[in-house]
Image: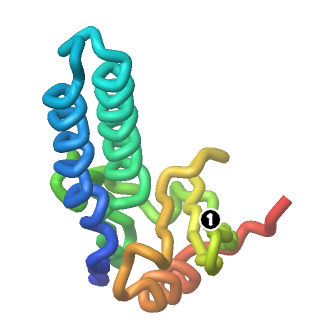
């Protein structure tokens, strides 16, 4: 059984969340109008947007993966969410894609079931990404990009 290991960067959105909350508190403290201040309302909207983004990222990219002989087990929210098990024979296959950022690009593995992406694994977030990639490529067929 192969278990994914997170890099430290996977925890950074969680550690940055208090900074957004501090921004909201500071905007309230320095505003003349209190709760009705435009800056305070903007910062509150920013906080809500940040929390939605964090929730999406924790459910989509920060998943703990266990690769067994016959199945892949996935738990969202850094391994604390509800586990999902996918039998290897029920999966369509995997696809490799390059995602580019401002300074560099990274590889992402997309695992498909019934034509939908069920697992996303980015090399940015996993220490043992090469081992995960090797295990997946041995157990699943590669789907060509369209």
Q: Is residue 18 above or below residue 51?
A: below
Of all residues, the one furthest to the front in this rendering is: 32
Q: Position of residue 65 (x, y in %)?
A: 33, 68
Whole-percent x, y for residue 87 in the image: 42, 60
Coordinates of residue 60 in the picture (x, y in percent): 42, 51
Tell me what residue is drawn at x 55 percent, y 85 percent: 138
Of residue 114 and residue 124, the one placed in the foreground of this image is 124
Residue picked out by circle 1: 93
The quarter of the image holding the C terminus is bottom right
Q: Is residue 85 above or below residue 25?
A: below
Which residue is at the far right?
146
- SS class of the residue under badge 1? strand
Q: Quadrant of residue 98?
A: bottom right
Q: In the image, 6: left or right of 140?
A: left
Horizontal side, residue 105 vs residue 64: left or right: right
Relative horizontal placement of residue 80, taking residue 2 as reference (left or right): left
Report the front residue among 24 and 15: 24
Q: Position of residue 75 (x, y in %)?
A: 27, 56
Point 18% across, 15% down: residue: 34
11 vs 28, nearest the viewer: 28
Closest to the observer: 121 or 55? 55
Above or below, 62 against 134 in this view is above
Q: Residue at x 23, y 56 (%)?
A: 14
Number of dots carrying numbers: 1
Scheme of image coloration: rainbow
Q: Is residue 96 above or below residue 85?
A: below
Determine crowd level at label 1: few under 14, some 14-19, many 20+ residues with C-alpha closer than 10 A.
many
Give the quadrant of the N terminus: bottom left
Residue at the image point whose x is 14% and y is 29% from the top = 29
């Amino acid at each position: 059984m192969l278990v994914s290991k997170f890099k430290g960067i996977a925890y950074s959105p969680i550690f940055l969340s208090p900074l957004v909350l501090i921004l909201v508190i500071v905007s309230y403290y320095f505003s003349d109008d209190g709760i009705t201040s435009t800056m305070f309302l903007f910062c509150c909207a920013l906080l809500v947007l940040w929390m939605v983004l964090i929730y999406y990222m924790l459910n989509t990219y920060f998943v703990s993966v266990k690769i067994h002989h016959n199945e892949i087990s996935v738990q969202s929210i850094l391994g604390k969410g509800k586990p999902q098990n996918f039998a290897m024979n029920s999966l369509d296959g995997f696809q490799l894609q390059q995602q580019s950022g401002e300074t560099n690009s990274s590889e992402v593995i997309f695992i498909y079931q019934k034509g939908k992406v069920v697992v996303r694994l980015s090399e940015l977030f996993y220490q043992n990404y090469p081992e995960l990639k090797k295990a997946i490529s041995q157990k699943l067929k590669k789907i060509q990009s369209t």
